[in-house]
Amino acid sequence: MLNHEITSTVGKHKARKRVGRGGGTGHGKTCGRGHKGSRSRAGATRFSLYEGGQMPLFRRLPKRGFSNCRFAVRCEIVNVSQLERFEDGSAIGIEQLSDVGLVGGPESKVKILGNGELTKKLEVTAHKFSKSAEQKIVASGGTVKLI
């Protein structure tokens, strides 16, 4: 057995800590939990922002402002170059894009952007199109349909 073979296996499998098995083990009686307090009891979990009873920072700071980000409509983006994988003359909708894996699922909103080149005649159906994407699809002989 060589030196590098020994060091790769040493410490690979760490034995679990067996608690409550007598004072001689160093983990007897209180099992490493100390005396009393919430962390010594079974089922105790601490709130991650807990500050020892002090008023937490997020409650000390005032609530200010409003953000519309929760109400934003987010679209999944597909570039014109990614549509090149479909066959010439095929109709492409949200279902076809999700089957190929370009969008998350059939319920997602899709915007087609004009990055890349398109050489095939396609019927593309989506929620939104950029001007350049629309021009490239029409220039290659295809059609654009909004949902």
Image (tube, rainbow, N blue to C red):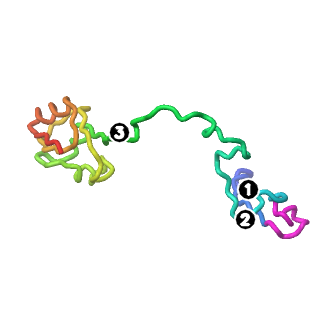
For the record, the magenta segment spans 19-32
Q: Which of label 1 and label 3 is nearer to you?
A: 3
Q: Are marks 2 and 3 in contact (CB under 8 Å)?
A: no
The quadrant in which residue 99 appears is bottom left
Q: Quick one: SS at disc 3?
A: loop
Query: Residue 78 appears at what percent x and percent y?
Result: 27, 40
Question: Which residue position holds label 2?
Answer: 42
Q: Is residue 85 left or right of residue 8?
A: left
Structural crowding at the residue carrying mark 3, measured as other residues with C-alpha within 10 Å and reported as few (<14), some (14–19) or many (≥20): few
Q: Which of label 2 and label 1 is nearer to you?
A: 2
Of callouts 2 and 1, which one flags the residue occurring earlier in the amino acid sequence?
A: 1
What amino acid is labelled 2 in the image?
Ala
Query: Residue 102 appears at what percent x and percent y?
Result: 30, 47
Of callouts 2 and 3, which one flags the residue occurring earlier in the amino acid sequence?
A: 2
What amino acid is labelled 3 in the image?
Ala
Seen from the viewer's position, the closer of residues 85 and 18 is 18
- Residue 11: assigned label: 1
